[in-house]
Structure formats: C-alpha cells, structure tokens
Image: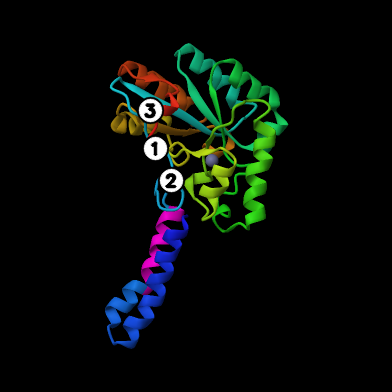
C-alpha cells in the first residue's frame, strides 16, 4: 500500500471527527468506517488491486488461456498431471509451496524439465493468517520459499498469495524481491466442487481468450476430483479449440 493511500485513509478517520463535532453524523460515520471497508475489501477479495496490484489476464486474440496449478508439488498428483499436460501439449505454471518443494525437489526439477513454469506460493501456505502476519513472518514466508524454489526453477518471477488474501506490506515486500503478484480471472472451483464434471463445466462456462485459470493439486483438492478435474478441463478446452500457454510477460495485465 502506498504512503499516499495510507495518508488518505487516515485523513478520512480524522475528518470524520470534525464532521461529528459539526453535527453531520451520517457523513461522520461514513468517513469513519470507509477506511475499514476499503482495507477489508482490498485485503480479503482476491484480485482487488488497492493494496497489492496483481496480474489477472493476458492480451491475446487467439483461443488461449494460462493454466495455473496451485499448492504442489505433490508426490502423487504432480507426475500424473505432468503426463496429462504432455498428452495435451499443454503448458502450465505450478505455484508451489516452499516447504513441499524442499521435501521433493526432484518434482520441481521435473516440472521445469518438461517445459512448465514455477511460481512462488509462500513457504507454508498460511491461508488464514498471512494477512495479519508480522513483518518478520511475512518476510520469512517469502524468503524461505524463494530459497527452496529459486535454485531449482530460476528465474523465480511470479508470486501468488494463498487463497488470494493479501498483506498490507505485501506489494513492497514483493517488489524488493523482484516478484510480481499473479491472481486469476477464472476460478475452476476445484477445491469446493463435488464432481470433476462440475469443475469442467465451470471452466467451460467462463472461458475466454486471455483468462488465467486457477486449479489445484494435492490434498487441498477433494479426493474424487484430484487430477481427474484437470484431465476433464484439458479435454474440454482442447475440444473448444483452446490452447494452454504460458503467456509472454509483456502481454500480462
Ligand atoms: Zn494455495
């Protein structure tokens, strides 16, 4: 979050006191609570741009999407997903959790060897607590994962926050490390769906050229959907004439 934004939010709070003293209560209440709503919206709504700007799509005139797969590597799922991607001549970016990558570095090397991208998805995936983490904890999450991933998959450029929830220091912390935040424009819903066909239908309903598709691997996906949902999505996208590509950085928006 920039200093200018912080100044404006504080000005709203102090201005509300002046309005209250003058007796303009509705306006005073509005100005008092506006910074809280703004902060909550931009922290907790993935793809909100106020606190930490993120990439959510790419420019293309072709039927192409960027398939991103979060929460790996997973010893069971990752090798099977890599085979599926090969079969469909699809490229994807795996947003990996640092401590999992440190346990199975051979999977990270295999992802890279097969021509896919690797992104940073924090060290321990603190989905519920990153937003309120201390500065030291935030930096440890970033630096520990970078230490695990960067030697295996250089250059490490893309970062995705767990479940898309940001921290008010995140933008500056990422910039210092040369990382860029990537969100998505198409949630597959694979972590809450009950059938792989539902995930496929979600993707088909919303797919458009240049969308960034969010999917998952490993234990965060319901057992019935693991790998199978990705398989159905790859088949359905191919049937519609869509290719899964890793977009050039200059096309990302
Ligand atoms: Zn995740």
Compute the Cα span from label 1 to label 3.
11 Å
Secondary structure found at label 1: loop
Queried on whether the Cβ of the residue with tag 2 lies below 8 angstroms from ligand 1, the answer reads no
As drawn, the residue found furthest toward the front would be: 4
Nearest to viewer (mark 1 / mark 3): 3
Is label 3 in a helix, a strand or a loop?
A: helix
Residue identifier under label 2: 53
Q: What is the x, y in percent for residue 43?
A: 46, 55
What residue did someone put label 3 on? 251
- Residue stretch in magenta: 32-44
Give the quarter of the image for residue 146: top right
Using a 10 Å C-alpha cutoff, classify the residue at mark 2 as few (fewer than 14 neighbours), some (14 to 19) or many (20 or more): some
Q: Earlier in the sequence, mark 2 or mark 3?
A: 2
Identity of the residue drawn at 56% across and 20% down: 80
Task: Name the one closer to the observer, 207 or 53.
Answer: 53
Residue 84 in sight here: yes
Q: Position of residue 26 (x, y in %)?
A: 28, 78
- Dividing the image into 4 quarters, which one contains the C terminus? top left
């Amino acid at each position: 979050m920039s200093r200018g934004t912080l100044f404006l939010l504080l000005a709203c709070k102090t201005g509300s006191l002046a309005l209250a003293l003058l007796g303009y209560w509705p306006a005073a209440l509005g100005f008092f609570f506006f910074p809280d709503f703004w902060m909550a919206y931009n922290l907790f709504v993935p793809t909100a741009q106020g606190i930490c700007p993120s990439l959510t799509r790419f420019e293309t005139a072709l039927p192409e999407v960027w398939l991103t797969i979060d929460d790996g590597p997973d010893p069971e799922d990752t090798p099977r997903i890599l085979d599926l991607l090969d079969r469909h001549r699809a490229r994807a970016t795996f947003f990996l959790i640092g401590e999992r990558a440190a346990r199975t570095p051979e999977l990270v090397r295999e992802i890279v060897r097969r021509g896919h991208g690797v992104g940073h998805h924090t060290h321990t995936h603190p989905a519920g607590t990153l937003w309120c983490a201390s500065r030291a904890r935030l930096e440890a999450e970033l630096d520990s994962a970078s230490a695990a991933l960067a030697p295996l998959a250089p250059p490490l450029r893309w970062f995705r926050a767990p479940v898309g929830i940001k921290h008010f220091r995140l933008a500056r912390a990422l910039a210092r490390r040369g990382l860029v935040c990537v969100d998505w424009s198409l949630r597959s819903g694979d972590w809450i769906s009950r059938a792989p066909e539902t995930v496929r239908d979600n993707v088909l309903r919303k797919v458009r050229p240049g969308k960034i598709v969010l999917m998952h691997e490993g234990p965060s996906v319901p057992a019935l959907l693991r790998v199978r949902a990705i398989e159905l999505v790859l088949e359905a996208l191919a049937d519609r004439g869509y290719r899964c590509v890793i977009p050039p950085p200059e096309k990302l928006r």
